[in-house]
Image (cartoon, coloured by chain):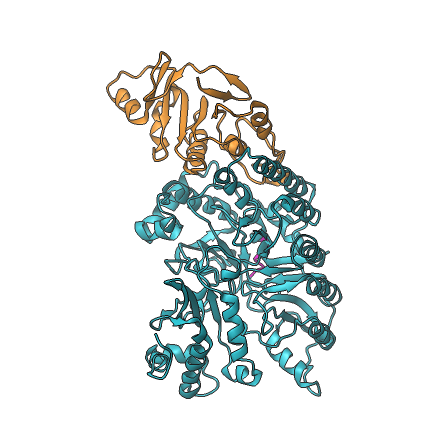
Chain colours: A orange, B cyan
Amino acid sequence: MRKTLWRRELRADAWRYPGEDGTGEPVLTLAGLLQAAAEGRLARTGVGVSLGPTDNVELLAPLVERLALIVVQFEKSGDGRGFSQAQLLRQRVGYGGELRAGGAVSRDHLFLLARCGFDAFDLDPGEDLEAARAQLERYSVAYQGAADTLVHPRRREEFAA
Amino acid sequence: MVRVYQYEAFDRTFVNERVAEFRDQTRRFLAGELSEDEFRPLRLRNGLYIQTHAPMLRVAIPYGMLSSTQLRMLAHIARHYDRDYGHFSTRQNIQFNWPKLEQVPDILAELATVDMHAIQTSGNCIRNITTDHLAGVAADELEDPRPWCELIRQWSTLHPEFNYLPRKFKIAVTGAASDRAVSAVHDIGVHLVRGPDGVNGFEILCGGGLGRMPIIGKRIREWLPAAELLAYLEAILRVYNSHGRRDNIHRARIKVLVKSLGVAEFARQVEREYAANRAFAPQVSAAQIARLRASFTPPPYQLLSDGDPTPGAGAAFVAWYRHNTRAHKVSGYRAVFVSLKKHGEAPGDMTSGQMLGLADLADRHSFGEVRVTHDQNLVLADVPQHTLAALHRSLAELGLATPNIGTLTDMIACPGLDFCSLANAGTIGVARQIHAQFDDFDYLYDLGEIQVKMSGCMNACGHHHVGHIGILGVDKRGEEWYQITLGGSASGEVRLGEVIGPSVPKAQVAATLERIVEVYLERRHDADESFLQTVRRLGLAPFKERVYAQDAVAA
């Protein structure tokens, strides 16, 4: 059972990631999703997709209204590509649904991940939930703008767009 | 008011929250809740390395600017948490070589009381922004680069998207005709330039760097409007973060990406990202840059006139004045170099007593401000000429008046094998050897300007590629050998030096340099032809011939 922090709460996961067994709603790979769309068999709503670090997120732009979950998979803790993918999904692609950090997600990255637009996090089974929540409140201020859908650090007046 | 960036409650809140975070992370590491692998990237982003003997803490000195109050705090840290000294680095930062891991959160908390930190002084993120150590006082300056440095510092500090880059990332900014920040060997070089309408904007270089694959940065933008600076930097960083190699640490710097794509294609990708991101990219507002400029207004200079203080003065003062002071754009003032290259001492090292003494001298003579240069000296930038004699006496008492700025013994050296776990070579010992060989100051002055730069390994922290004489420590079957390059230069037209031949054994480094400068003395047109000019005119051949002559060193 995956331990997913959605916003600030633990949530039971109804999704089945690519390669996983079970009964949950399947999450597609990007290639699978694009193929289904090309063949006209992609559901109109409620679609989940899982992205690897080299996937081009801008390909999702025409399909964004159909998506209910995007999981950005971190193959290694601290792979910075996922941070850029998240910002692009929120800002350029205009995705407003659940954006989850999956794979090697460390508690210490949660604040920066949240700033980039993630609002859900697959935690280690042994992770301390309270500590993970607290990390989302680690900084009350920030020097620069970002997607910031879950956390809202104060910025300097003249920095605010 | 001292001309360092003036913190507000906002900045202090941020730094204090950072200290609290690192205190928690250190506690978890010591309690076994974080493994070494998990803790490493976290501690590195707070300047903490685990070195050969002990942890090393690198404290940020943003673009090299320090107040006397901050320098006193560094002295306090050196005295109470370390072995009574610190080491100034080529990124204008300071390193403490002997802190205790469990005390580092306390050190950071103490630093925070004087608006200092160690954030992003290491790790694969945007490092300390560096600039011209004569910013604001140089006559050849178009515009003071420091407000722009501070702008980039704030933007890059804990930037959520760019904290986990493929590799470290270094940005230098200059606003003067002469590049004293070595910007062409940075990941990004930012140059203030006058634009078509007489308005200042930026020229952007990208993909420079030293290390294993030294490359001069290439211009990717001829002119960028000033308000667009951060938007354009974001575009560069996003292209790099998305496409820079992560599979091989030696191929991960942006220079490899620029080289593999080709400059034109890299620039095209940056421009595409820049254009696509307009709706979200930060714009530099007039209010924002005005607020930053307010921290760097000129100090309250007195109305003084220029005069030559050397007639009738003692020989020691005259030598110091000639070599360790520079012209100032305001009449009646000089910029004074404080030499951290006393013969026999490790280049860049300073004791807590010297720091405290210099802090007092900065208050007395230079508006309470001290600067760190990338070649490991300090500068008092605004000294009235009529107090130079008194300042010289005081600096001499502190052992900080060695009149060797710009000479062969004013060399850069990384900490080397004595401290650094990456090094192959004991650079500090070699520095001592060179100091001993070239201890005759009249001889040094006759040799004129020679920049010697020494690194203990391929990572090139000592900038050896751009030394007039570069020295690189290499390991050969467990022994220290040294590879010599000639003809590099870090300013004017930046060039990489060429290797003269097989490396020489440790004991022969100073003697090899002696042979090289003998060729220069014999072959220069006259004393006005510098070492570098002579090397460029002659090429390597005569130097090689002398160094590897039969009676010379065994290669």
Quadrant location, the C terminus of chain B:
bottom left
Q: Is residue A83 placed above or below B299 in the rendered structure?
A: above
**As rendered, which of A141 and A92 lies closer to the eye?**
A141
Q: Outermost residue, left direction? A: A39
Residue A116: x percent and y percent? 49, 33
Quadrant location, the N terminus of chain B:
bottom right
Residue B79: x percent and y percent? 69, 57
Q: Which residues are magenta?
A: B143-147
Residue drawn at (51%, 75%) of the image: B434
Residue drawn at (62%, 81%) of the image: B319
Residue B109: x percent and y percent? 68, 44
Q: Is residue B363 placed above or below B387 in the rendered structure?
A: above
**As rendered, which of A89 and B290 lies closer to the eye?**
A89
Q: Is residue B379 placed above or below A11 in the rendered structure?
A: below
Q: Quadrant of residue B406?
A: bottom right
Q: Is residue B381 placed above or below B32 in the rendered structure?
A: below
Residue drawn at (54%, 53%) of the image: B129
**As rendered, which of B462 and B179 lies closer to the eye?**
B462
In the displayed structure, does residue B275 sit left or right of residue B442?
Answer: left
Q: Is B6 included in the stretch rendered in magenta? A: no
Residue B280 in sight from this viewpoint: yes
**As rendered, which of A155 and A5 lies closer to the eye?**
A5
Residue drawn at (45%, 88%) of the image: B526
Q: Quadrant of residue B389?
A: bottom right
Q: Outermost residue, front direction? A: B478
In the displayed structure, does residue B121 sit left or right of residue B2?
Answer: left
In the displayed structure, does residue A122 sit left or right of residue B320?
Answer: left
Residue B441: x percent and y percent? 57, 82
